Amino acid sequence: MVRPTRLQDILYHDWLLPQEARSVRSEIRRFVDEEVMPEADNLNTCIEDAAAFPRRLFCRMAEAGLFGVPFGVECGGRGLEYPLCAATVTIEELAYASDGLAAIYDDHALLPGAALLHGSRDVRRRYLEPLISGSSIACMAITEPHAGSDLRADTIHTHAVRDADTYVVNGRKRFITNAPVGDFMTTLFVIDGAMAMLVVDLHASGITVGPPDHKTGNRVQLTADVWLEDVRVPCGNLLGEIGKGLHIALAALTWGRIVIGASGVGMAQAALDECVHFMQRREMYGGTLGDLQYWQLRLAERATQISNARDMCYKAALLYDRGSRKPEPEMAMAKYYGTQVAGDMARDAVQVFGGLGYVTRLGADGSTYRVEQIYRDCKVAEIYEGANEVQKRVIARSLLGSEYLS
Ligand SMILES: Cc1cc2nc3c(=O)[nH]c(=O)nc-3n(C[C@H](O)[C@H](O)[C@H](O)COP(=O)(O)OP(=O)(O)OC[C@H]3O[C@@H](n4cnc5c(N)ncnc54)[C@H](O)[C@@H]3O)c2cc1C
């Protein structure tokens, strides 16, 4: 099968990115072309089941050092000068082929990894190093049935009491990515009315992981509820201090929001490339679909938006890596705009493909269509890691001041 041309290389020249991140992009592009593309259809259309977790690919990502991209050498990472820029292009390139796989990476390496940086040296040795080497699978557990966007000490029901040198934890988490196959989860909980973050071993007594959720898209990203019933966790597994749990979660989500914006860019770019490829070949009215000015202009608009979204993600990542200041509102702009562009582009892409854009698999010959997969995958990026309305509130806070919006 002839793959569409990567129009990013023609339209966008990565001039914002440091050379280091450009090299990481070339490396990940090669990895995706060789290792992910041949399996992408399965990843994007599988039915959620623990057996669907792509263990071989996960191990290959570990062997290729992908999980070390955001981290320093002291814990087994790459020690890059621009780690978030590199992680941003990593997610973008993975999402080009499979947003579900990009989400596995994000919810394994980035979010729990960022939280673990707040742990003691011993915690980092026991959890962060295995995360980076791929010998453990990590999860980030923030959401609960009654608390998603609105995270406060009185909305979070997962709670702990201290008993000698352990915390005894009870509660329930929802939509936890990687939980059906996971080894541990960095967990937001409440103790004595204050929020805190703890590493919980998923093989501990008192843990029950529910069956995987069946979702519209991102099929290979397995999510499930996790019940905690009198789970004993060593006090040494506390990340940071009691009272700093939300701060740690939001710090991890600073990485998360920028890379989710980039996942939108990756999906939008893939949909654009597919459209151009298809429009040049689909014959109609004595010419091709590409001859129709309506679609020429529409794709020109989308290409411009994708370029803008990509700039916003890199700008936020660069600000973060240079340590100049917290990239707010840039990270919120990158997340909301990058994921919105993905949704807009995906809707157009399905339209361009006509009926073929709407089939998961064509009965006659078994063919599948990337644009249909992207259409299903992109929606969740507008919801998770801070719904886009929450991002707009963050932007509004920068405009009006925090006295207007908490
Ligand atoms: C596939 C998938 C994977 C996930 N993985 C994880 C994971 O690994 N770990 C984890 O902890 N969680 C995970 N989540 C949960 C995800 O982060 C939450 O779904 C998200 O934060 C939204 O919370 P909610 O679903 O409870 O929706 P709610 O908080 O109930 O929000 C519903 C809607 O209300 C609107 N809204 C919310 N706040 C505002 C506002 N301030 N202004 C205007 N409108 C607003 C938004 O439109 C929002 O979509 C995952 C979810 C999915 C679907």
Image (spheres, rainbow, N blue to C red):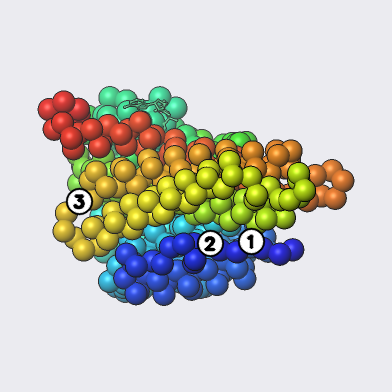
Q: Is residue 235 visible?
A: no
Q: What type is the residue that disc 2 sits on?
A: Leu
Q: Which residue is mark 1?
A: 4
Mark with earlier residue (2, 3): 2
Dot 3: element: loop
Q: Is mark 3 within 8 Å of ligand 1?
A: no
Residue 213: image x %, image y %?
A: 59, 36
Residue at x 55% of width, y 70% of height: 31
Q: Is residue 80 left or right of residue 356?
A: left
Q: Is mark 2 within 8 Å of ligand 1?
A: no
- Bin the neighbour count of mark 3 within 10 Å (Cα to Cα): few under 14, some 14-19, many 20 and up: some
Q: What type is the residue that disc 3 sits on?
A: Lys
**Which of the four quarters of the rendered structure image does ligand 1 lie in?**
top left
Q: Which residue is mark 2?
A: 7
Residue 369: image x %, image y %?
A: 70, 49
- The answer for how far apart the CA atoms under marks 2 and 1 are is 8 Å
Residue located farthest toward the right when viewing the structure as drawn: 364
Q: Which residue is mark 3?
A: 326
